[in-house]
Image: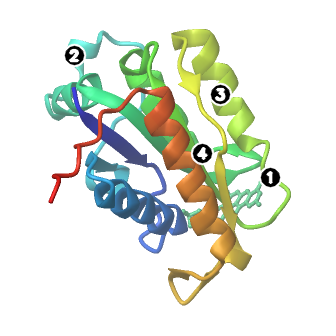
Amino acid sequence: MNEIVLIQSSLNPKSKTAIVLNEVKKKLEEKGAKTFLLDLRDYEIPFCDGRKFEEYPSHLQDIKSILDNAHAFVIGFPVYLYTFSGVLKNFLDIFSSAFHQKVCAIVANAGGSNSYLASRDLMNAMSFEEGTLFIQPTVYTYSKHFSEGKITDEYVFKKIDQMIERLIKVSNYKLPVPAEH
Ligand SMILES: Cc1cc2nc3c(=O)[nH]c(=O)nc-3n(C[C@H](O)[C@H](O)[C@H](O)COP(=O)(O)O)c2cc1C
């Protein structure tokens, strides 16, 4: 139970959400945290149809055990129609119970500057359903923060640092103690 699991839920091969989550992962690892990136582009996940969880394909059990063993989460999503994407909604329809009473940070990536309340929809749904505790700040990025597939705005790095610091603190994640010289 000592991994921070990052969920990347854009299916775009050139996803900017993925760029930000990879940066979050890198920064967590620099601090000594153990991480696992669950990139939904790498998994076939069927639509939720209300069947029992055990009746889904067996690789979903593997995903469930990764989630169940997570200490805390970072959920990354592309903003679609002012909210979180349908891909993430379907993922949570199937796996929401793995987020029960856990601590979670959010990365939301949009095309423009005005859709920042998209994360509120995620917070509302998961707080009511599973008691998931969301920390702030949310990292909200959009097209202006990137150039040629890279983050180019210092603001994003600063927000990532603040988010990580808060996630580690609130989830009581035990970072390794640096050796004394
Ligand atoms: C169906 C669809 C709906 C979108 N809706 C919004 C929106 O409401 N607000 C916004 O700022 N950008 C919107 N966008 C732009 C995406 O958020 C943007 O392309 C972003 O980079 C997606 O993240 P990704 O690169 O990780 O896939 C939309 C894009 C698509 C394809």
Would residue 141 be found to the left or right of residue 28 on screen? Answer: right
Secondary structure of residue under mark 1: loop
Residue at image position (19%, 26%) is 65
Residue at image position (55%, 39%) is 166
Query: Which residue is more in the foreground, 39 or 68?
Result: 68
Compare marks 1 and 2 and give the one earlier in the sequence.
2
Q: Which residue is mark 1?
A: 115
Residue at image position (43%, 33%) is 91
The CA distance from mark 4 to mark 1 is 12 Å
Q: Residues within 10 Å of mark 4 (few under 14, many from 20)?
A: some
Q: Which residue is mark 3?
A: 123
Compare marks 1 and 3 and give the one earlier in the sequence.
1
Q: Is mark 4 within 8 Å of ligand 1?
A: yes
Query: Which residue is more in the foreground, 54 or 122?
Result: 122
Q: Which scheme is used to colour this image of the protein? A: rainbow
Residue 141, located in which quarter of the rendered image? bottom right
Q: Which residue is mark 2?
A: 55
